[in-house]
Amino acid sequence: MSASTAFTAAIVPAAGLGTRFLPTTKAVPKELLPVVDTPGIEYVAAEAAEAGAERLIIVTSPGKDAVAQYFQPRPDLEKTLADRGKAALLEKVRRAPGLLAVETAIQEEALGLGHAVGCAEPNLRPEDEAVAVLLPDDLVLPTGVLARMAEVRAAKGGTVLCAFDIPRAEISAYGVFDVEETGDPDVKKVNGMVEKPPADQAPSTFAAAGRYLLDRAIFDALKRITPGAGGELQLTDAIALLISEGHPVHVVVHRGGRHDLGNPGGFLRAAVDFALDHPEYGPSLQAWLRERIGSQ
Ligand code: UTP
């Protein structure tokens, strides 16, 4: 199996409560909030497709049907736009359904990220030896890290995660990897993981990001862990169990940018960042921001 075909299924867990976006998330899933005009989950689906995924398994919850609906074609709307000669809008409307085949798995109750990933197991096919997991509230820029992770799995086997090199002063906000060198400065072997350590006790400055290339063994490990932090089944606990049993786990250090769409502050940054690059909205937003900040 070549690196580019290391996985054909990608799981996007989108069944969380989104409490940091309340009250909006009473009615609107946070995964559909627009970064300028496009929901974060579309960027993540496009990243999965670019990395070779053919199937996207969205883990959703009762009441969040709109997330999967977003990936369905809208022939009625397409016809209206076509009749009106709105080619650019038509392309936008068709983009998400055209990316890859979308299916859903239901997580009845938000019992944690590990539990959400486990809910997707029945969607896997016998040939899926590994599966990618992409968190829809984490934009990893530029895209391409999953392809690199697939190369590392092809070379070293097992499970491959994504890390960012974070300044030590900020490290205590993250899950941090305990690593050893491999000879490639961007690939480390993982010996363990610590959640939110004090800066002076952090085992490294490599923090976990929301991209995973998981060996299928993870599903067995998920059945053997017990609820951890917050009473939730944690994906990192299942990965730690695999490490303790000798399963190879590596990280690829992504030397790029990132936006955390999971809280309003990070989401606004992403929106401003994308809007500043937008040909229609960028120039006037920049002028307005300068004036707004200048008048503080
Ligand atoms: P988060 O913890 O960032 O999302 O989980 P959340 O729980 O929805 O948000 P807050 O903390 O209440 O504001 C990361 C991703 O995992 C999914 C979320 O939907 C999000 O995309 N998730 C989390 C699930 O699918 N199920 C869960 O039980 C927990």
Image (tube, rainbow, N blue to C red):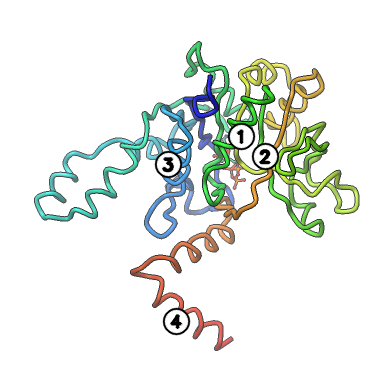
Q: Name the residue under label 3.
A: 46
Amino acid carrying label 3: it is Ala
Could you tell me how far apart the alpha carbons at marks 3 and 1 are, in whole angstroms? 17 Å
Between disc 3 and disc 2, the foreground one is 2
Q: Position of residue 266 (x, y in %)?
A: 58, 58
Mark 2, secondary structure of its residue: strand
Amino acid carrying label 1: it is Met
- 159 on left or right of 282: right
Amino acid carrying label 4: it is Ala
In contact (CB < 8 Å): disc 4 and disc 3? no
In contact (CB < 8 Å): disc 1 and disc 2? yes
Depth check: 171 or 167 in front?
Answer: 167
Q: How crowded is mark 4: few (under 14 residues within 10 Å), some or many (20 or more)?
A: few
Between disc 1 and disc 4, the foreground one is 1
Q: Residues within 10 Å of mark 1 (few under 14, many from 20)?
A: many
Q: Farthest residue to the top: give it.
A: 126
Q: Where is residue 66 in the image (x, y as percent from the top left)?
A: 37, 39
Could you tell me how far apart the alpha carbons at marks 1 and 2 are, in whole angstroms? 6 Å
Q: Where is residue 269 in the image (x, y as percent from the top left)?
A: 55, 63
